[in-house]
Image (spheres, rainbow, N blue to C red):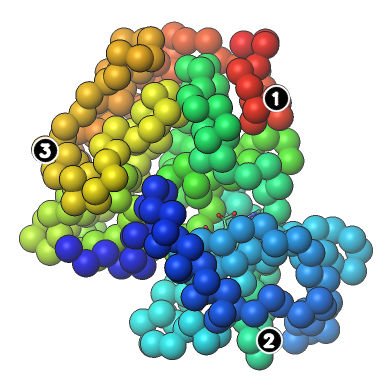
């Protein structure tokens, strides 16, 4: 099975391959110069290294007024083929057109001889994956709070005919006020007016929907994002994604067999289990719409925190 943007690097458990990739990426992507100047003459001062994905490295960038942004930096040396170039341009085009409180705001895009820079709103409190690593699992009210924000952003994306296709805890960041922001539009697909399905096999193993694994014959559409919401709610409540295995092929087999088990180690409400089962329906047609998700008993009946503070990043908050 060939996965676009090799998923071994995106598989959250494969540290060795990640390290190799990091070394290769570091060799390609030189640290940006201390001042990056845009064609229109604006200057940005490079700050701290923020993190890296399969494709880009991210640095803080300060503008001349002192405002801080995140710059996703892609080495030109890594954009060798037309296909890679088209994909980067597509990411920029899609992300640029987004404007929603729960989507990382695109600010600007520029280049120098070495890199292409995508300037973004900074999310200094890391991602939902970092929160889960620190907390192991989170409470249902917190998961409900986060899921509403994610669902709101996905509703917006889908209303604009965009499928994200790589929704996962590591791509959902916290802004300074602890609001969630969906980022990384590297695998997003614009459906335009056409209703045809997409056939590229892509995503991150733990989050891939079964119809994506069906490949060329089956095709996939907006419902892959709904599936990913199900995976994320499960992971937040139980501490790991439902089909987790150290062998990627086993993950795929478990996804295809809908081998869904709810560990008894966590006392999770019946309404959460029902919603997760519905979100992880093998048939895309059976999955709920965003409106149906938000109407489900899990959202309507449970505790809902008025706000989430930074305390949640480290421990179960006292006031829930
Ligand atoms: P890739 O497309 O290569 O997967 P990502 O968009 O996932 O790149 O970004 C790589 C890393 O950079 C993230 O894991 C995160 O640590 C950091 N990062 C990305 N966007 C932001 C942001 N807006 N604010 C702060 N850090 C960010």
Does residue 98 lie above or below 312 as drawn? below
Q: Tell us which disc is closer to us: 2 or 3.
A: 3
Which disc number belongs to residue 112?
A: 2
The residue sitting at 29% across, 33% down in the picture is: 242
Q: Nearer the viewer, residue 128 or 196?
A: 128
Query: In the picture, residue 115 is in which quadrant?
Result: bottom right
Q: In the image, 118: left or right of 260?
A: right
Q: Quadrant of the N terminus?
A: bottom left
In terms of secondary structure, where does tag 3 sit? loop
Q: Nearer the viewer, residue 31 or 41?
A: 31
The answer for how far apart the CA atoms under marks 2 and 3 are is 48 Å
Is 309 positioned to the left or the right of 28 in the image?
Answer: right
Quarter holding ligand 1: bottom right
Residue 257: mark in rendering: 3
- Asked if labels 2 and 1 touch by Cβ distance under 8 angstroms, the answer is no
Is residue 6 toward the left or the right of residue 92 in the image? left
Residue identifier under label 1: 311
Residue 30 seen anywhere in this rendered image of the structure: yes
Residue farthest along the left direction in this orientation = 217
Pointer 2: residues within 10 angstroms few (<14), some, or many (20+)? some
Q: Is residue 247 above or below residue 234?
A: below
**Mark 3 or mark 1, which is nearer the start of the sequence?**
3
* Circles 1 and 3: CB atoms closer than 8 Å: no
* Residue under the image location 82 percent in, 78 percent down: 35
Asked if residue 156 shows in the view, the reply is no
Rounded to the nearest whole Å, what is the CA distance between mark 1 and mark 3?
Answer: 39 Å
Locate the C terminus and report the quarter of the image it occupies.
top right
Q: Position of residue 199 (x, y in %)?
A: 20, 64
- Measuring 53% from the left and 45% from the top, which residue is drawn there? 172
């Amino acid at each position: 099975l060939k996965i676009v943007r090799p998923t071994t690097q995106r598989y959250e458990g494969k540290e060795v391959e990640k390290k190799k990739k990091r070394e290769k990426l570091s060799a390609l992507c030189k640290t940006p110069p201390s001042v990056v100047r845009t064609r229109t003459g604006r200057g940005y001062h490079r700050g701290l290294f923020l993190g890296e994905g399969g494709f880009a490295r991210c640095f803080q960038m300060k503008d001349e007024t002192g405002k801080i942004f995140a710059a996703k930096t892609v080495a030109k040396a890594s954009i060798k083929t037309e296909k890679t170039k088209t994909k980067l341009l597509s990411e920029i085009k899609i992300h640029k057109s987004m404007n929603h409180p729960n989507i990382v705001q695109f600010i600007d895009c520029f280049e120098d001889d070495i890199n292409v820079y995508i300037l973004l709103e900074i999310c200094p409190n890391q991602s939902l994956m970092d929160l889960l690593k620190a907390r192991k699992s989170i409470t249902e009210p917190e998961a409900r709070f986060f899921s509403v924000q994610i669902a709101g952003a996905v509703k917006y994306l889908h209303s604009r005919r965009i499928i994200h296709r790589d929704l996962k805890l590591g791509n959902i960041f916290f802004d300074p006020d602890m609001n969630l922001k969906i980022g990384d539009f590297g695998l997003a697909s614009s459906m335009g007016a056409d209703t045809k399905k997409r056939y590229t096999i892509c995503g991150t193993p733990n989050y891939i929907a079964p119809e994506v694994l069906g490949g060329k014959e089956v095709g996939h559409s907006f419902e892959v994002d709904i599936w990913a919401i199900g995976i994320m709610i499960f992971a937040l409540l139980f501490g790991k994604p439902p089909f987790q295995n150290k062998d990627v092929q086993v993950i795929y087999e478990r996804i295809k067999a809908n081998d869904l088990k709810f560990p008894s180690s966590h006392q999770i409400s019946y309404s959460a289990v029902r919603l997760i089962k519905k979100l992880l329906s093998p048939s895309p047609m059976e999955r709920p719409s965003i409106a149906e998700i938000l109407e489900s008993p899990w959202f309507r009946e449970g505790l809902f925190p008025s706000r989430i503070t930074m305390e949640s990043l480290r421990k179960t908050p006292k006031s829930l």
